[in-house]
Image (tube, rainbow, N blue to C red):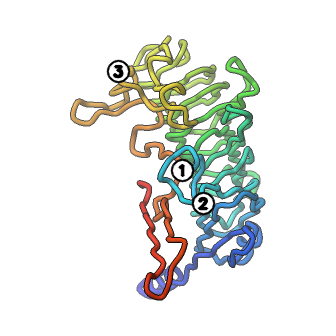
Amino acid sequence: MALLCLLLNSQDSLAKIWRVNNNAGVAADFTDLQSAVNGAAPGDTLHIEGSPYSYGGATIGKKLTILGPGFFLDENPNSQALQHSGKLAGIAFNVGSEGSLVMGIDFQGNGINIFSDDILIRRNRFSTQNGVIPDYSIGTINLYYRSNNSNIPINNVIISQNYGVKIAVSYASTGVLITNNYICFEAWGGDGTTSYCLAAHANAILLVQNNIFRRGKVGASNSNFTNNIMVFGQFEGTGNLYSNNMASASQFGNANGNQENVIMANVFVGATTNPTAEGQWKLKAGSPAIGAGYGSTAQNPIDCGMFSGQNAYILAGMPPMPAIYSFEIQPIGSNTDPIDVKVKVKSAGN
């Protein structure tokens, strides 16, 4: 056992961080995602740096951490000095990628296909913009089966703090946590669309909490829904447990702390007060969602919606790592007056 622990610790200490950057004139380790995946070893980290160009997609069969700089950086002051996001096309996680994490990525309407257990998808953007509509098109996170055995559904997947995403659980997966996301069908479908924003197999078991459902149908059975807000949409399924959700109509009913027929203009600050894509979904003063969450007390209030709970949504999707948000350099210097550089660094919360 001691030898095994020594070997594991040795493997962790050998993990490497790779730079992925396709900007002209930048000396990086890789310029596209698939080459970075192929060149990295299990346990390594890929830093996808900001760029106006996409790094493409990849099929992944090893444990990797993929980190981007976040998104909506131009809408969130003091987020990143370089306001380009790290853009990727679709990703497929195959068996062998167990334990992988992808965070802070701009998928630009593309999605993720999961064929492996134990995947964490956190703080990513899956939408594309059309004019002033930030969620005009939406990418999908698809949960399938193990890539080496189509008879075994994948299990233990966490989908947390993502913006503008659809979710499809196509097989009888268990251990699926969906928390603090902005979930919706495409805006082009309209608020009355009956297309699914969250669709789950009848035997899949989900824990769904503190999400905002913007538009589209939610279909799930034998799952638990807590502290969610449905702005527009429909709900269908059997055997579910509902508590402390609120909706614009009677989607969750009014038992077990649920609230129905809520006027959504009274819930959120809205685009007039906070015109950013994410910030408009914060709760306004006096919102009926404040303190309405399951287990809320006066000493420890818990709200409904994506900005509350243990995994509160983080603006701009920035990973919890140091980020340069201000960079100032003196344009001219000399031997007697060296060039001054002022850098400000901060870290997003966990």
Quadrant assignment, res 259: top left
Q: Name the element at disc 2.
A: loop
* In-front residue for pair 94/188: 188
Q: Residues under labels 1 and 2: Cα distance?
A: 9 Å
Amino acid carrying mark 1 in the image:
Gly
Residue under label 3, please give it: 286
- Residue 337 in percent (x, y) is at 44, 82
Q: Name the element at disc 3.
A: loop
Circles 1 and 2: CB distance less than 8 Å? yes
The residue positioned 71% from the left and 38% from the top of the image is 129
Location of the C terminus by quadrant is: bottom left
Disc number placed over residue 317 in the picture, else none: 1
Q: Name the element at disc 1.
A: helix
Q: Earlier in the sequence, mark 1 or mark 3?
A: 3
Q: Which of marks 2 and 3 is nearer the N terminus?
A: 2
Location of the N terminus by quadrant is: bottom left
